[in-house]
Amino acid sequence: MTASKASTTGPAPQTQTRPAPGQSGLRVSQGRVLRSEWTKFRSLRSTVITLGVTVVLMIAISALFAAVTANQYHTFSGKDRLDFNPISTSLGGISFAQLAIGVLGVLLMSGEYSTGMIRSSLTAVPRRLPVLWGKLGVFGGVAFVVTLITATVAFFAGQSLLAGKGLDVSITSPGAVRSVFGAALYLTVAGMFGIALGALLRNTAGGITTFVGVFFVVPPLMGLLPSSISDHVTQYLPSNAGAVVYDGTRDLHGALSPWVGLAVMCAYLVALLGAAAWRLSRTDA
């Protein structure tokens, strides 16, 4: 009786709680940050809309350029016919598509600052920089796939419109594959410029304004400078340097070679990302 009572009133045996499967050793890693950023990316309605606008602008305006060129080719001067490039003509919508994808890049970063979501992101990822790398990784992967498909469709649509006048070329023509592939690379890097500007300026209006200035305002203004200056500077601007990879600047004096030009554009991006990473890691959200 005594033994029974002692056994019932004694301390309850300690049960060892084991972590649930998949929860042991949870820690912040770049892979988990990537998954988090992917969830945020695909859940934003503005992301789908802006990507859709990029696709429509690229294909529709490229087709318009090709159709107008085919219709007006008989009026071209001898010089214009020599300068005519069916590949770049069928990719003429890039200059418009880059605005949409640049805005998307800015919004992905600056939008979190405007809503205050960035505080939650940085609380979950105290080291901060993985958030920036995660956004770049998700955006870069999605943007490249989407723009590569879009550029391919734009190329074939444009060539079909030029074929009526015998102006078309095939995808196996010299420079065609490189231009289609380069168009996707160019647009992806341009969008990453938007992310870097959003992270650096932390303001949507400021990021978009700066992007527009760098890609759309400064290059034409360089033409107002004396040729002794502009001929040695214009080809090194980010947009002009990168556009050579898809034959977008054939009339540019002293244009760089395609892959060198893209490398120069990427060098600008690396410098801008360095400044954005420094501010993200050094200053409060």
Image (cartoon, helix red, strand yellow):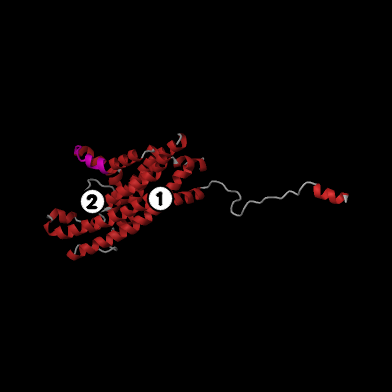
Quadrant location, the C terminus: top left
Q: Residues within 10 Å of mark 2 (few under 14, many from 20)?
A: some
Residue at (40, 54) in percent of width and height:
142
Please report whichever mark, 2 or 1, sits nearer to the chain's N-terminal start.
1
Q: Nearer the viewer, residue 188 or 5?
A: 5
Which of the 4 image quarters holds residue 73? bottom left
Residue 62, compared with residue 120, is above or below; it is below
User: Closest to the observer: 145 or 81?
Assistant: 145
In the rendered view, tell whether residue 161 sits above or below residue 113.
below
Q: Secondary structure at mark 2?
A: loop
Helix, strand or loop status at disc 1: loop
The foreground one among 249 and 174 is 249
Residue at 35% over, 47% down: 104
Q: Which residue type does callout 2 highlight?
A: Arg
Residue 20 highlighted magenta (yes or no): no
Q: Is residue 144 visible?
A: yes
| Residue stretch in magenta | 216-226
- Give the residue pinned by disc 2: 250
Circle 1 residue: 44
In the figure, residue 85 lies in which quadrant? bottom left
Asked whether the beta carbons under mark 2 and mark 1 sit within 8 Å of each other, the answer is no
Q: Nearer the viewer, residue 158 or 237?
A: 158
